[in-house]
Image: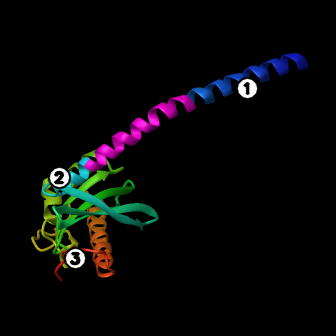
Amino acid sequence: MTVRDILKITLTLVIIYLAGGVILASVYSVTSPVIYKLNKMEKEQALKEMMPDADKIEKLGDWTLRDKPAEYFVAKKGDDVTGYIVQSYGKGFGGYLTLLIAIDKDLRIQKVKILSHKETPGFIENVNSDKFLGQFKEKGLDNIKLVKVETTEHIQAVTGATVSSRGVATGAREGLIFLIDTLKGGIKNENPPKG
């Protein structure tokens, strides 16, 4: 093989890599805005699902949990605050679970939704069920404790998915603690929460 052959092969590979890079950049520039819009619409829909009675949901700010960025929102009907929505994370068996927690003015959880996860499909189905997530409704900070026995006062773990159950309960509890601390720290609120 001569020097000329080596240069020819090298030049051919460089041209192929550059063409591939240009194609990838073009595809990204076209799809990125579409993906951004879809993610934004999906987020707005999820927020509205958390507080369906609210006329508007406004972002109050950002916070960090386990080095992961999260947001929190206020839900209003007219000028009255109806509640809050906090994004949170819990450590599951396969990785982090991303959660949304709807919290009323009395600082009681109204709804928990799992937005994303990396859990085993068969196990997460039981955790992501109305039976499990429904246990969080009307629970305050003192009642968000995961137990393995039947209970109505606390949160009963899903058999076979205790780690995922714990991740949801921990994420919901930490989101509620954050909101309580933030509200006591002075979020401007026309209707301050009781307690």
The picture places residue 42, in percent across and down from the top left corner, at 29, 45
The picture places residue 151, in percent across and down from the top left corner, at 11, 71
Main SS, magenta residues: helix
Q: Kindly state the secondary structure of the residue where label 2 is placed.
A: loop
Q: Is residue 34 magenta?
A: yes
Name the image quarter holding residue 153.
bottom left
Q: Amino acid at mark 1?
A: Val
Disc 1: which residue = 14
In-image side of 140 versus 86 (left or right)? left
The picture places residue 5, in percent across and down from the top left corner, at 84, 16
Q: Is residue 105 magenta?
A: no
Quadrant location of the C terminus?
bottom left
Name the image quarter holding residue 53.
bottom left
- Of residue 129 and residue 123, the one placed in the foreground of this image is 129
Q: Residues within 10 Å of mark 3 (few under 14, many from 20)?
A: some
Q: Residues within 10 Å of mark 1 (few under 14, many from 20)?
A: few
